[in-house]
Image (cartoon, helix red, strand yellow):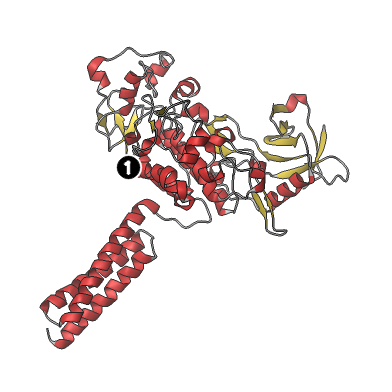
Amino acid sequence: MRLQRQSTGELIVLGEDSLLGTGGEAHIYVVPGHENLVAKVWHKPSPERTRKVAVMLANPPVDPMANQNHSSIAWPIDMLFPPGRARVAAGFLMPRVVNVRPVADYMHPKTRRRVCPLFNYRYLLRTARNLATAVRALHERGYVIGDLNESNVLVSDTALVTLVDTDSFQVWDAETGHMYRCRVGKPEFTPPEMQGKTFSTIDRTPANDLFALGVLVFQLLMEGTHPFAGIYRGSGEPPPYEKRIAAGHFPFGGDPRIPYAPKPTAPPFEMLTPGLQNLFLRCFQDGHFRPELRPDPQTWQWLIEEAESHLVVCWQNNEHLFGDHLEKCPWCERTELLGGRDPFPSADAVKRGEHLRPMPRRGAAGRSGGQKERLPIAPGVPLPPPIPKSSPGGKRSRPSRGKWNEVAWIAAGLGAVDIAATGVLLRPNALTFLFGIAALLTGILGEANSRKQEIGGRGRWLARSAFAVGLGTTIWCLWAGT
């Protein structure tokens, strides 16, 4: 098969020897002479596909991993046409990523032990963080993934992420006002507001992606457990995932009214840091009726980074990393629960080839879980490479810690303004003067805090209001001779 690059006119010959794989909609080929490129050739080319890719080429997202020499988004690079004056593209060129596997291979301990046994919890956190960063880059350019699921996320052994099947994304053509919709979706990654809908007739929103992002992050950090998996306590056959999602039956939320309980083999929800627990509750409980309440990618990015900074190491196995809010190692306990199958085998066990078979049971002491220690990571085991602090195009903010400080300063500002105003309405005396000083100091501290945390809005406004009222009250009292 001979195809021609649109940008350069170069002829490319694709044959059976360069075929990488075949999917439901296209063949994927290695491009001869360009080992860093692959060609996606559609089974059924169409004018609509051609126009959609043209819009994507004109407005590419900023790849947050470009400085790592890695493509986190397999975005079209050039279109391919049959030689001649054909107007309908046969496919397109995109970056080739190597040494990657589907994200599901890393979620589940059984496959993880086989394909990459030293992929510990730090790597899983970094994978989730890189995934959120890639989704954020797309949303910042106005794209919606639509069909975000475990099959279009690829991961390397160093926790780098690549999103594929980008030509299925929802794309808005600003020039013509046409929306190229995402026509497919997996029920177990589809948000409640989209369950049962015909995707080809509905425009997706970023909030729809945020549900699927939450599902993937949950599975990465909870040993492959789907957030809506659980033991059914009702009568009859357990409903499928799409029914549970539509009903909002999140079994880890602690709501006794739902007819599900977490599976005994699932990691305990409390194993996650409090910040991450809160994000999952926002995603699957608060966001059930109000999708806009689901955490955005940057919020996931910050909270995952925070969780990574609080990792400690078990003294029995330095591949057991867990949050410092826990008293004992959850992975030692899970090893016992799983019949000696360690989710994160030690480097020595891997060297001896013992990671693929159950370890001997350790008795009561082992079942209690190893104590935590702040130790260095095992020598010779490379850490995942760092990622940019934030993807280009967005201002840095701290949605978690900043929001809580904003709430605190709102309360402090309101209290100070109320106290100072009450004092003003009475009379200028020593107590009123002290109220004014308190409001003045609260305003100064609130302003400094909001600048430090890069937050604005009501928190900064109330801090400035407290400062103004406090300053006015203090001057009034001094002028009156208090």
Going by the picture, which residue comes out furthest to the front?
235
Residue 246, percent across and down? Answer: 50, 40
Whole-percent x and y of residue 176?
72, 58
Image quarter hosting the N terminus: top right
The answer to whether 168 is drawn above or below residue 439 in the figure is: above
The kind of secondary structure element at disc 1 is: helix
Q: In this view, does 337 lie to the left or right of 165?
A: left
Quarter of the image for residue 66 reads top right
- In the image as oriented, which residue stretches furthest toward the bottom? 480
The answer to which of 260 and 158 lies nearer the viewer is 260
Tell me if residue 258 comes above or below residue 134 in the rendering: above
Q: Which of 242 and 166 is in front in this view?
A: 242
Tell me: residue 51, above or below residue 153. Answer: below
Is residue 385 visible in this depiction of the protein? no
The residue at 33%/40% (across/down) is: 273
Quadrant in the picture for the C terminus:
bottom left
Task: Provide the residue designation for mark 1.
Answer: 274
Residue farthest right in this picture: 84
Q: In this view, does 225 lie above or below 46?
A: above
Q: Which amino acid does label 1 sit on?
A: Pro
The spot of residue 153 in percent (x, y) is: 56, 35
Mark 1 nearby-residue class (10 Å; few <14, some 14–19, many ≥20):
some
Q: Residue 188 at what x, y percent from top left?
A: 53, 35
Residue at the image position 42 percent from the left and 56 percent from the top: 397
Instruction: Give the number of marks.
Output: 1
- Side (left or right) of 227 relative to 374: right
Residue 250 quadrant: top left
